[in-house]
């Protein structure tokens, strides 16, 4: 093993329920050639599953998920940049929300109920916008994993 380099673990999504995962107590060892190992890892990676999941599903004749499109380095950099910009947008929306909240506090102290209500509504819309941007950032990051 000293000359072998370990591949990072791929995140896979279980096909079963947590209860099924707890019932999977048995383990099998399989010996494969270098070519077979490479082919198994390539096919598992294209399907977004682990090699173990690929082997179990194939042996039990379960359909594999559709192959994912390969993502190149340029696309990863673009996605990373976009997620960073979305994070900046979330921070800015948070600062705006803080300002709205401060204005609503002043309106409450001064007794301007109409202004306070409008500011509270704006604060709610700002919070909704933050949630939507976070969802987009999460979906974008998840799409390349």
Image (cartoon, helix red, strand yellow):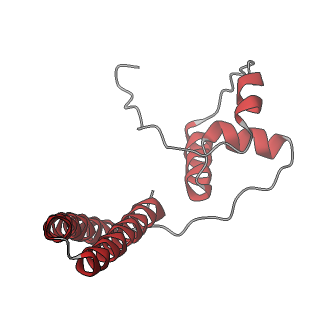
> Where is the C terminus found, in terms of image quarters?
bottom left
The quarter holding residue 31 reads top right
Of residues 70 and 123, the one nearer the viewer is: 123
Q: What residue is shown at x 63% (from left), y 64% (from top)? A: 67
Of residues 98 and 18, the one nearer the viewer is: 98
Determine whether, in the image, residue 121 is placed left or right of residue 94.
Answer: right
Q: What residue is shown at x 29% (from left), y 70% (from top)? A: 123
Determine whether, in the image, residue 48 is placed left or right of residue 24.
Answer: left
How many numbered tags mark residues here?
0
Determine whether, in the image, residue 71 is placed left or right of residue 67.
Answer: left
> Where is the N terminus found, in terms of image quarters?
top left
Q: Residue furthest right?
A: 61
Across and down, in percent, residue 39 comes to: 60, 49
Across and down, in percent, residue 107 comes to: 17, 71
The quarter holding residue 63 reads bottom right
Whether residue 42 is situated above or below residue 83 in the rendered picture: above
Across and down, in percent, residue 124 comes to: 36, 70
Q: What residue is shown at x 83% (from left), y 41% (from top)? A: 59
Determine whether, in the image, residue 64 is placed left or right of residue 95.
Answer: right
The quarter holding residue 86 reads bottom left
Whether residue 136 is situated above or below residue 63 in the rendered picture: below
Of residues 71 and 18, the one nearer the viewer is: 18
Q: Residue furthest front?
A: 111
Of residues 22 and 8, the one nearer the viewer is: 22
Whether residue 101 is situated above or below residue 34 in the rendered picture: below
Across and down, in percent, residue 127 comes to: 34, 67
Whether residue 6 is situated above or below residue 102 in the rendered picture: above
Q: What residue is shown at x 41% (from left), y 61% (from top)? A: 138
């Amino acid at each position: 093993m000293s000359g072998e380099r370990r591949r990072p673990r791929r995140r896979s999504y279980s096909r079963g329920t947590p209860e099924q995962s707890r019932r999977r107590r048995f383990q099998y060892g399989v010996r494969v050639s270098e070519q077979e190992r490479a082919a198994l890892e390539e096919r598992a990676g294209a399907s977004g599953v682990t090699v173990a999941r690929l082997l179990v599903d194939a042996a039990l004749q379960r359909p594999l998920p559709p192959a994912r499109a390969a993502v190149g380095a340029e696309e990863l950099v673009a996605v990373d940049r976009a997620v960073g910009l979305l994070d900046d947008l979330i921070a800015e929306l948070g600062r705006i929300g803080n300002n709205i909240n401060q204005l609503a506090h002043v309106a409450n102290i001064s007794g301007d109920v109409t202004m306070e209500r409008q500011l509270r509504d704006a604060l709610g819309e700002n919070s909704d916008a933050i949630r939507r941007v976070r969802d987009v950032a999460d979906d974008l990051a998840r799409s390349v994993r």
